[in-house]
Amino acid sequence: MAGRGPASGERRGGEPTVNERNKVTTEQYAREQALEDKVVASFETAEDPRLKQLTQALTRHLHAFLREVRLTEAEWDEAIRFLTAAGHITDGKRQEFILLSDVLGASMQTIAINNEAYANATEATVLGPFFVEGSPEIPLGGDMSFGAAGQPCWVEGTVVGTDGKPVPGARMEVWEADEDGFYDVQYDDDRTAARGHLFSDENGTYRFWAITPTPYPIPHDGPVGELLAAVGRSPMRASHLHFDVRAEGKRTLITHIFVRGDELLDRDSVFGVKDSLIHDFVEHPADTPTPDGRDLGDRSWSSVRFDIVLAPADTTGAGE
Ligand code: BEZ
Ligand code: FE
């Protein structure tokens, strides 16, 4: 790359100067720059212009990182060991690379880039690794817990467009961890619990029973957990319930609702919390009548309202 400004290490008065950013001599700077430029040029042949842009920008940023931190060979070996371990622990049920992307904030940054705020549309947040295709359908008012441990929670709301019109037939996938902090897929017994899908009715309203979300750690028995421990970061996620909402002509919304008052809201391990997604979960003592007359015996329950606003499909801008 031609010249990074005066910091490129020009000779002053015939003496070798050091590059001020990377603290290397002019000659060393030039050697490193020549290699970077050569690698960038090697991608010139890419026929796909987007692939060319991605590979060249990746090269520039990667080399800038290596040069800025003056990466040692031992550190590079450690990075390779880390990525190899992430590969080895990854299988059909465990996705260490998603966790890595999440704790680096790369997932949330990609979501920010691709889901620009549009009018009053509900904000998006991280998908996480526990979404599973083929969840059971539940009727409106049905129970998606399927026996998962936790306090019953009544969830209701509407699905509308940014024009305020109800969205009937929106497909809503919902999933969450049980009160022990595990998703069904983290158990070895092939259970399906605390997940399901339903459809909004002709007025765009919906309701179902879930369990009150509780905090849980992201899987931290692998290399990502090692990294968090090494830097003194907690693996805990703020309590949440996941939603994936799809409707014809609308932008797909992947989001959560969070529990107001949860002490983890300002230190979620994957940076997923947005103020607009924090909701009041109202506590109801045992014996309080439930909205649908369900008899919960001696159990207390909670309730939350989540009104969802979907942006039009193919929108990226701010809207009116
Ligand atoms: C989740 O919310 O399910 C999740 C998100 C990121 C990493 C791990 C789990
Ligand atoms: Fe989650």
Image (tube, helix red, strand yellow):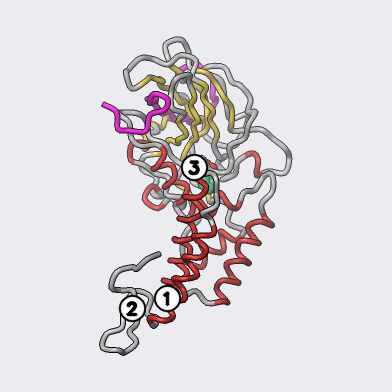
Question: Mark 1 vs mark 2: which is more N-terminal?
Answer: 2
Position of 204 with respect to 163 (left or right) is right
Disc 1 and disc 2 in contact, CB within 8 angstroms = yes
Q: Which residue is drawn at 62% across and 58% down?
A: 221
Give coordinates of residue 166: x percent, y percent: 39, 15
What segment carries the magenta color?
Answer: 291-320
Q: Main secondary structure of the magenta part?
A: loop
Residue 189 vs residue 50, the one in the foreground:
50
Give coordinates of residue 21: x percent, y percent: 34, 74
Disc 1 and disc 3 in contact, CB within 8 angstroms = no
How many callouts does the rendering have?
3
Query: CA gap, disc 1 to disc 2?
Result: 9 Å
Q: What quarter of the picture does the N terminus occupy?
A: bottom left
Q: Which residue is disc 2 drawn over? A: 9
Which quadrant of the view contains residue 295? top right
Does the beta carbon of the residue at mark 2 sit less than 8 Å from ligand 1? no
Q: Would you place residue 6 above or below residue 133 in this image?
A: below
Residue 123 vs residue 261, the one in the foreground:
123
Could you tell me the amino acid type at mark 3?
A: Thr
Q: Which mark is residue 214?
A: 3
Could you tell me the amino acid type at mark 1?
A: Ala
Could you tell me the amino acid type at mark 2?
A: Gly
Q: Is mark 1 on a helix, strand or loop?
A: helix
Give coordinates of residue 231: x percent, y percent: 47, 66
